[in-house]
């Protein structure tokens, strides 16, 4: 397998090296092309070959085993051969079922399916990008009568190759969740937390507190007291505001103006009942 893989790598990189010898590049550019791009192509093809073998092997075991196990379980045995044949089929079925479970676990643990498509997509992009650069076609061709050459387009080529590799690294290692697996809170351009997505999984009372905090962050006033949250009669009105907040798209454009229009939040009207500020302290 190693000999076949090496021969295949030679067939992949040999045309690139032949085309490289026929173009005009500076000495350092030629070294970068050979030591970086050619090496990346060879490494990418080797990874594709390895992941293809692992992916297809596990898929074949899972597919065939999933068909064989139900068929063996449904076999009806004769009483005369019950002691010999049934035991043989029983242990064979157990072994096949164990292989299917192990293959399915390996496929999920090592993410062979995701890596299979990711590695092949990256390899094809790298190969296509290299041939477009060597032929000065695609986004490397001259536009508007400007001079064009491999030397002038070399920086664009290396930047594109590194961008493809960084995109692959992000798909593999960079996650959209934190260490504990909790979804990160989104924020808008002003740094205000996007409470619309989070209130859907919170209780009404917690959502009210977050909406009041968003009001304080969005509209800070010098010397003004923090918005207060009534505890009894005004609570039903705040619940209505929370339900309205779940139907809008931007908390800074729809939720905040609605809250500032309410006199019992900005403190313009007299309070006749006990209130609790956003910090949790009790104020009569």
Image (tube, helix red, strand yellow):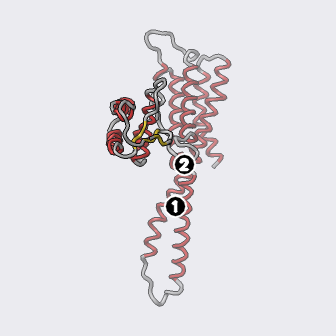
The image's mark for residue 284 is none
Q: Secondary structure at mark 1?
A: helix
Residue at the spot x=38%, y=37% of the render?
Answer: 271
**Residue 119 visible in the picture:** no
Q: Nearer the viewer, residue 255 or 189?
A: 255
Quarter of the image for residue 175 reads: top right
What crowding class fits label 1: few (fewer than 14 Cα within 10 Å), some (14-19), or many (20 or more)? Answer: some
Q: Position of residue 184 (x, y in %)?
A: 51, 40
Discs 1, 2 touching: Cβ within 8 Å: no
Residue at the spot x=47%, y=18% of the render?
Answer: 141
Residue behind mark 1: 61
Q: Position of residue 259 (x, y in %)?
A: 36, 33
Q: Is residue 233 left or right of residue 116?
A: left
Residue behind mark 2: 52
**Residue 248 visible in the picture:** yes
Q: Earlier in the sequence, mark 1 or mark 2?
A: 2
Q: Is residue 87 above or below residue 186?
A: below
Q: Nearer the viewer, residue 279 or 275?
A: 275
């Amino acid at each position: 397998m190693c000999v076949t893989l090496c021969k295949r790598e030679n067939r992949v990189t040999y045309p690139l090296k032949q085309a490289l010898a026929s173009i005009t590049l500076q000495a350092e550019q030629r070294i970068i092309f050979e030591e970086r791009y050619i090496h990346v192509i060879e490494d990418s093809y080797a990874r594709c070959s390895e992941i293809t073998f692992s992916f297809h092997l596990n898929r074949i075991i899972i597919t065939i085993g999933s068909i064989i196990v139900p068929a063996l379980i449904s076999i009806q045995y004769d009483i005369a051969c019950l002691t010999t044949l049934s035991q043989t089929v029983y242990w064979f079925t157990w072994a096949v079922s164990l292989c299917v479970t192990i293959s399915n676990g390996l496929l999920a643990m090592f993410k062979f399916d995701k890596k299979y498509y990711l590695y092949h997509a990256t390899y094809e992009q790298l190969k296509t990008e290299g041939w477009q650069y060597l032929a000065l076609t695609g986004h490397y061709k001259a536009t508007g009568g400007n001079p064009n050459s491999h030397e002038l387009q070399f920086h664009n080529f290396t930047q594109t190759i590194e961008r493809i590799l960084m995109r692959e690294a992000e798909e593999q290692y960079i996650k959209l969740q934190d260490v504990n697996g909790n979804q990160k809170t989104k924020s808008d351009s002003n740094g205000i937390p996007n409470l619309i997505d989070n209130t859907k999984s919170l209780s009404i009372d917690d959502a009210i507190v977050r909406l009041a905090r968003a009001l304080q962050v969005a509209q800070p006033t010098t010397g003004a007291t923090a918005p207060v949250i009534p505890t009894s009669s005004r609570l039903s009105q705040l619940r209505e505001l929370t339900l309205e907040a779940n139907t809008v798209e931007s908390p800074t454009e729809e939720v905040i103006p609605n809250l500032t229009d309410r006199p019992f939040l900005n403190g313009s009207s007299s309070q006749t009942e006990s209130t609790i500020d956003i910090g949790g302290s009790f104020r009569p």
